[in-house]
Amino acid sequence: MKVKIATAEDGMSALEEQAKQAQEEYEGAIALKKLNEKLNELTRLVGWAEVDYKEHKIASLEQEVAAIDEQSGNCEAKLEEAESTIRSLEERQRQADQQRTALCEKLNEIGAMGKEEKRRLRAAQERQRQAADRIASAENSLGQVRCELTQSEKRLERKLKDLERNQQEARAKEERAKNTLELQLAELKTSLDGHASRVDALKAQTDAANEARDNAAAVASRCSQKLNESRDELRRLQSNNSDSLSRIHPQMPQLVEAIERSSSQFRSMPVGPLGKFVKLNDNQERFSNVIETALGGDRGLGTFVVSCKEDEEILRRLAQNLHRTNAPP
């Protein structure tokens, strides 16, 4: 009966644990649904943030292109200025050539001139040389300006290519992000459908667990009632057993209790008294005297069986102690 009660109590504990687990999973499914709604909202916000970032990046690239265009305009202005300087120097060179020609003609006319005239001629030649140097320097500057213009055009072309490539990558990334979000939304919808069906199943399990718990409680109540009845019966039997020991000898119940308290001292627990194991069937009371005589009378009914001499000495000592304790003063 105790085993049945323990089994019923274990079953009730398991059912209560299942009901608690089902309730936690149901609450978890509700929380998951709320988290999915927050995820959808965050996904929309992230998408708009990426669009704003890409628009900002495109505007920045357009500003860089405008700056390059402005630099190209400045280079073209410098080129026009250099070309104007070259034209001015060429004009001055032409004038110097005309002066040199005039001087040569004059030298041919007058033949030999004095030191002053030679100095003027050398000064004119020096100015001509300086003009040639300035023309060469202007040509070098014009070459540098043309080189810078070419490099600016190349940089502008590279920037335009980078801008176009970034725009293509941004569009591809947006497309991939869109596809990924669509897949995630489809998976979330599928997961939500699965959780909904699971919640329904958990509700059914919870109802079944509650019903089983009620049934187990009823069974436990009946088992508890039977246990109480069994305990009453056990107490009644123990009372009868004590009465039967007292009939064998008034001090026999105390001796049996002393043996049980000293059980650790024995190699093997004594068996007895022998009268405790003698029971007559109904309508067989006429054989009581025969059996009592066969066992040796009251002394035989109060006999114990031991396994060794040491256990016999311990049993005798307990009996003697009990006899001294109960002896009159």
Image (cartoon, helix red, strand yellow):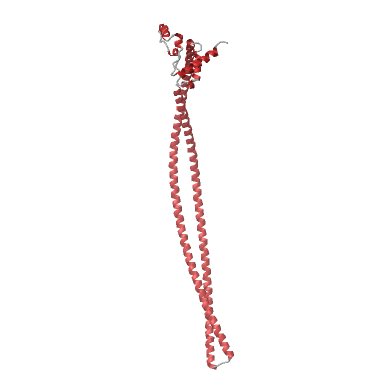
Residue at position x 52%, y 59% from top? 60
Residue 221 coordinates in the image, percent (x, y): 48, 22
Between 93 and 15, the one lying in front of the other is 15
Between 267 and 16, the one lying in front of the other is 267
Residue at position x 48%, y 32% from top? 20
Decide if residue 67 is in sight here: yes
Residue 170 coordinates in the image, percent (x, y): 46, 55
Is residue 198 positioned above or below 262 on the image? Answer: below
Residue at position x 52%, y 67% from top? 71
Is residue 29 positioned above or below 61 on the image? Answer: above
Quadrant hosting residue 301: top left
Between 132 and 64, the one lying in front of the other is 132
Between 146 and 219, the one lying in front of the other is 219
Residue 317 coordinates in the image, percent (x, y): 50, 16
Residue 284 coordinates in the image, percent (x, y): 40, 8
Quadrant hosting residue 171: bottom left
Q: Locate the N terminus by quadrant.
A: top left
